Amino acid sequence: MRKEWLKILVLLVIIIILFPWTVLRWHQQGELSNEEFTIRVLMPDGKVVVENLEEYLIGVVAAEMPAEFEEEALKAQAVAARTYAAKRITQQTSNGENYDVDTTVSTQAWISENQMREKWKWLSFWRYHGKIKEAVNSTKNQVLVLNGQYIDAFFHSSSGRKDTERAEDVWSSSRPYLQNVPAGEENPNRFVKSYSFTPNSLYQKLGVNGSVKAFADSDFTILSETATGRVKVVRVLGKNYTGAQLRPLLGLASTDMEIQLTSQELKITTYGNGHAVGMSQYGANDLAKAGQDYKEILQHFYPGTKLLFLKKAT
């Protein structure tokens, strides 16, 4: 009799707990698009490989965002990366190119499973790989759209002590969803870096010909700033540069900078890391820690956009 009661108890546990869980999981997955998509990836060896889009995104998220980040931040990154990839697929198909993305920051960074093992070592590989795979799978085929078009889902590491930037203040054209919004970062001084240039090194960095002279006060002059107070246009050694142009030329982390200039040294201190347009990755992580889910994070950084599912053209 006791054994019979035990069997009944086990059966009740299965019916009450496991069965509803299975139905819930099936229902959630059934709401997602089950269509499969592919992307053409230009590998470092020059070969073009056709990858399953969702598998490809695991390598992108692993390369673009620290695996230690909160799951909701990783999901937001997966959606942003998928949106970027989807737009590239559309653009490259119309342009007749033989690949959609490469594996560098020229498009989106991407690493292989072998590189993940090297990066995380064997003990952490399974945990981090599984965590990122879950973030990608749980947002399968979800992309950001505005007015029927994939958005430019730009992202960067850290906005630092200022709000994010408007697209038109960094590049040539505006996007209504890339505006000044709070970065959401709990530590505005997470990325503070200092750089020092002598007259000789600055001339070399900027490719300036002629005899090297000691710095004059006019050799580094900020002419205009963005709405957030970052450098927009600066005059250096007699030539005007946008902040976006100067940052890679001098190897600067950001265009939020403070300047100290003497006759023999230009000292630049930067705050934040990246172009500051779109989603701040560290901001996304801090918002996730504060309780926001990935949909709320995406709406914060890309206001007015819609989260929709990829669908094959008919």
Image (cartoon, helix red, strand yellow):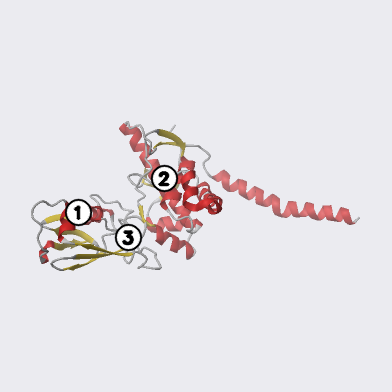
Residue to which mark 2 is pinned: 110
Secondary element at image label 2: loop
Q: In which quarter of the image is residue 99?
A: top left
Label pair 3/2, CB-CB below 8 angstroms = no
Tally the marks: 3
Q: How crowded is mark 1: few (under 14 residues within 10 Å), some or many (20 or more)?
A: few
Label 1 or label 3, whichever lies nearer to me, is 1
Residue 236 seen in this snapshot: yes
Residue 303 seen in this snapshot: no
Q: How crowded is mark 2: few (under 14 residues within 10 Å), some or many (20 or more)?
A: many
Residue at horizontal 48 percent and vertical 44 percent from the top: 114
Residue to which mark 1 is pinned: 205
Q: Where is residue 156 in the image (x, y as percent from the top left)?
A: 35, 55
Q: Position of residue 152 (x, y in %)?
A: 34, 48
In the rendered view of the protein, which quadrant contains the C terminus? top left
Taking 72 as reference, is 40 above or below it?
above
Residue at horizontal 21 percent and vertical 55 percent from the top: 246
Residue to which mark 3 is pinned: 164
